[in-house]
Structure formats: structure tokens, C-alpha cells
Image: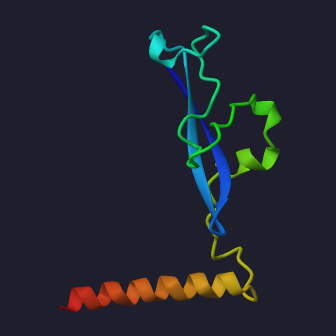
Amino acid sequence: MNLLVFYFFLWTNQVLTARICTRLTAQPTSLFSSESGGSEQKLCQGINYFKEGSDPPLLADSEYPEWLWDTLQPKQPVDEESADVNNKAYWRRLRKIKLRQANETRKKKK
């Protein structure tokens, strides 16, 4: 069974929430069969939380924007040697690391 995950981004109450929709393929049971008799779902079930309307249809991978697939990539860790000292993110990360080290030493003293 192949499980393909699609992220649909919906604006709700000015908050961007990611909804996960799955497409199950190669399922032998008739529970997952579509109206046309195929074994692949045509609608993203459960994504529509309004009383009216229907669930959005699943599209081919080529019909989705390219930035959607980039959101699945994890962030690259900041390397301390190659980081710019004048960068604000560098100093935030350094402060966070120092706080964690200080908290660990306090725990060991108790």
C-alpha cells in the first residue's frame, strides 16, 4: 500500500493551518473505491470542516505548486563556524545554547 501525503493550507481565523490529506492506492477492498470503480480516492476526505460544500478533489502532483513540496524538507541546522556573527539569528541561537547549558549545570548541582 502506498501512502501519499498532501498538505492543504487553509486560512482559518487568520492562522495558517496545515491539513493532511492522504491518498490510499492499491487497496483491494471496496471501502476505498471511488465512484468510477477504481481503487484510488478522488476526494480528500475530512478536509472540509464547513457544514455546506464538499471535500476538495485530489489532483496530480504536477498540478500543485512547486513550493508545496519544499515545505516537506527539514530546516538546515545553523553551523556555528560558518554563521555570520553580525546576524541576529546567530546571537539568538547562541543565547539559547548558553541557557540550555546553564540549566543543565544547575540541575546537576541539586
Q: Is residue 13 above or below residue 72?
A: below
At x 64%, y 60%, the residue is 75
Quarter of image, res 109: bottom left
Residue 52 located left or right of residue 108:
right
**Count of numbered circles in the view:** 0
Q: Position of residue 104 (x, y in %)?
A: 32, 84
Question: Residue 11: x and y, percent?
Answer: 68, 60
Quadrant in which the C terminus appears = bottom left
Q: Residue furthest left?
A: 110
The vertical placement of 74 against 79, above or below, is above
Report the residue at 49% width, 82% height from top: 97
Residue ID at (58%, 49%): 50
Give the camera-side residue of 36 and 60: 36
Compare residues 37 and 84 and report the one nearer the observer: 37
* Residue at far front of view: 52
Front-most of residues 94 and 33: 33
Name which quarter of the figure residue 91 lies in: bottom right
- Left or right, 104 with respect to 78, comes to left
Residue 26 placement (x, y as % from top left):
54, 14
Q: Is residue 30 left or right of residue 103?
A: right
Residue 66 location, quadrant: top right
Q: How is the image coloured?
A: rainbow
Q: Residue at x 56, y 46 (%)?
A: 51
